[in-house]
Amino acid sequence: MKKILKEFLISALLFFGTLYVTLQVDWMKALHLYPTIVGDKLSEWVWKISEMSLRKVNDHDVCAPIDSLVSEMCKANGISTADIHVVITRDDEVNAYATVGNHLIINTALIEKMKNESQLCAVIAHEMAHFRLGHIQSAVRQQTIITVFLALITGNGNSNMLANLTNKIISNSITRAKEDEADEQGARYLHAMHLDPMEMANTLETFESYGVLSYFMDHSDSKKRAEHIRKMHFKKNGPYQQILSEEAWVRLKKACL
């Protein structure tokens, strides 16, 4: 029994030690690979795997309002809508996340929980900031190699497992500093589209109150991040606007139940 336990501990140490070392190496640079080519191929591969596990929503009452919010945000901030690919999924987890290929995944449970369109825009703005600041792109290639490595050594090629694992690894590679940076940039996006930038702080506090694991809560204390946003100063830019009609907002929420 002691021998088995010893062998297990040694195997575990070797596994996690190898994984840790692998995470520290920029394999693209070490292998002299071209990121514009290889990175795109890896992103395409990861997205194909991830996409298979998603329950996509095509309901007009859901997609049309989200498209309007994203389009308004892009227009106000000089971002091409062609650069952002929004995918709405039927999922009970209160979550949204940015992943490979500039795909922004928004779960219906998150939409249903948001109190108003500004809070929903805060989530979208935060994730969009990750794209624009290069946070996702810098993590994709390295983390994809880790996923392949895990699949090879475990012999598990299950697509759902790989998709969930890859997205979680990419998510966890976003540091506290980058989360704060995305919060700040997201608040600026809200301000530019004449929405209250403090809704970023309100949204962070809302996630904290759920007491659930979400993308916003994976990396740091949401209350501290909200306090950080409240210390930011924004010039007054006129009255805050309402993008969606009350009817469209109600239909959106109902369609996500």
Image (cartoon, grey):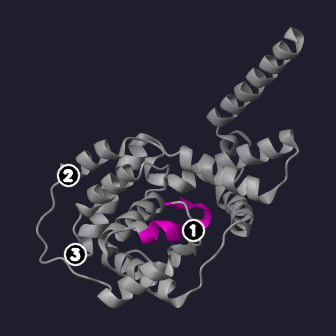
Badge 3 marks a residue whose secondary structure is: loop
**Front: mark 2 or 1:** 2
Extent of the magenta region: 94-112
Residue 75 drawn above or below residue 51: below
Residue drawn at (45%, 78%) of the image? 80
Neighbour class for label 1 at 10 Å: few (<14), some, many (≥20)?
some
Task: State the separation of the CA atoms marked 1 and 3.
Answer: 25 Å
Query: Per the image, is 107 magenta?
Result: yes
Q: Residue 230: which numbered mark, if any? A: 2
Q: Amino acid at mark 3?
A: His
Residue 236, given in percent of the width and then of the height, sits at 11, 69
Residue drawn at (82%, 13%) of the image? 6
Q: Amino acid at mark 1?
A: His
Which quadrant of the view contains residue 50?
bottom right
Task: State the separation of the CA atoms marked 3 and 2.
Answer: 17 Å
Residue pointed to by mark 1: 103
Total count of labels: 3
Q: Nearer the viewer, residue 21 or 226?
A: 226
**Front: mark 3 or 2:** 2
Residue 200, given in percent of the width and then of the height, sits at 30, 59
Residue drawn at (78%, 48%) of the image? 148
Q: Residue 128: which numbered mark, if any? A: none
Q: Amino acid at mark 2?
A: Arg
